[in-house]
Image: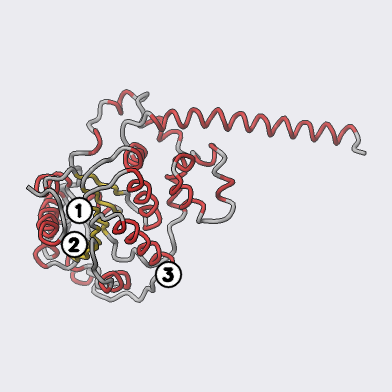
Amino acid sequence: MFNKDVLKLIAKMLVLVMIMGICDVFLGVVFKHLLKYQVNGRFYDISYNLDKTEADLILIGSSRVQNDYDIDVFSKELHLSTWKIGLGGQGLIYFRAVEKTVIQRHTPKLIVLNIDPNALEGDIEYDKLSLLRPYASDHLFIEEALCSKDKFEKYKLYSNIYCFNSMFYYLLDHSIYNKKEETKDNITRKAFKGTDSTLVIPKESEVNTKTTKATLNPKKVEMLLEMIDDVTQKNIPFVLAFAPNYYASNPPTATMNYVKKIKERDNLYIVDFSSDTSMVEKAPYFYNMTHMNQEGARVYSKRMSDWLKLHTKLSPIK
């Protein structure tokens, strides 16, 4: 039999576990309340992307979508409401989870996925998915993506402290409770907010002209193919696009070579502007080697809009 000291220790441990559980539940209520009342910032955008956007044209991608795609130009040229689901540094696993969640509740007229030159290479960006943890309990496809990291993740997601780790200050700073933030003009990001700075022309020796030898990650390739099937099987036109790079600063990569070999079919289109000489040789269109500034984004978005009108099944186009 256990002696009294052991029983006391067990009792104290149980009390501690109960206190921790109560704290976790309480903090979860606080965190979810702040998440619900975001007025701007990344969590406002993610929440809007997952639960509210009903745009006709959806643009998906990382920082290139944030900087290179001017939604005002697309809306004007195509007469379609346009929305960007862009988040810098994210990869296919993030975009796949968000795409599945969006098209489950809404059917856009067109989706454009901007593919980074090395998107299908390297390790899967599991750690960067942490931004989606607060949404796992309410979104099946988000939970599936998070749990694909390892077999213990589904148990960790039961903890609110884990899901919202290191997010409290950011959530508070971008909520309705921060009066300073409340005054900022950030309403659904309908206005394009790219940079207006211009690239300092690099020396020839600084321009990358060597072909990379990185190999494809089979799991990333599988994600892309599943994403293509998801979208096209819902009869949504799906465009895989490569945005311009200054001075063709990214020679053909394993990703680019693979994507361009994918056979176009009903509702699937592929377009490569990464080395388009009408844009890539003009430093005033860029603010660094791989991202366009406001002027460049307007030019590229017009070119892309014209291409979409010519090559895809868009309805209605006035």
Type of amino acid at the residue the image marks with label 3: Pro
Instruction: Name the mark on residue 311.
Output: none
Percent coordinates x, y for residue 172 in the rendering? 41, 30
Q: State the residue position of label 1.
A: 68
Q: Quadrant of residue 116?
A: bottom left
Q: Residues within 10 Å of mark 1 (few under 14, many from 20)?
A: many
Asked if the residues shown at circle 3 and circle 2 are in contact, with their CB atoms under 8 angstroms apart, the answer is no
Please give the count of numbered marks on the rendered protein. 3
Q: Earlier in the sequence, mark 1 or mark 3?
A: 1
Depth check, mark 1 against mark 3: the one in front is 3
- Tell me which residue sits at (45%, 38%) in the image: 167
Badge 3 crowding class, 10 Å Cα cut-off, few under 14, some 14 to 19, many 20 or more, is few
State how far apart marks 3 and 2 are (Cα): 26 Å
Among numbered discs 2 and 1, the one appearing first in the sequence: 1
Whichever of callouts 3 and 2 sits on the residue coming sooner in the sequence is 3
- In this rendering, would 182 be left or right of 149? left
The x and y percentages for residue 171 are 41, 33
Residue under label 2: 244
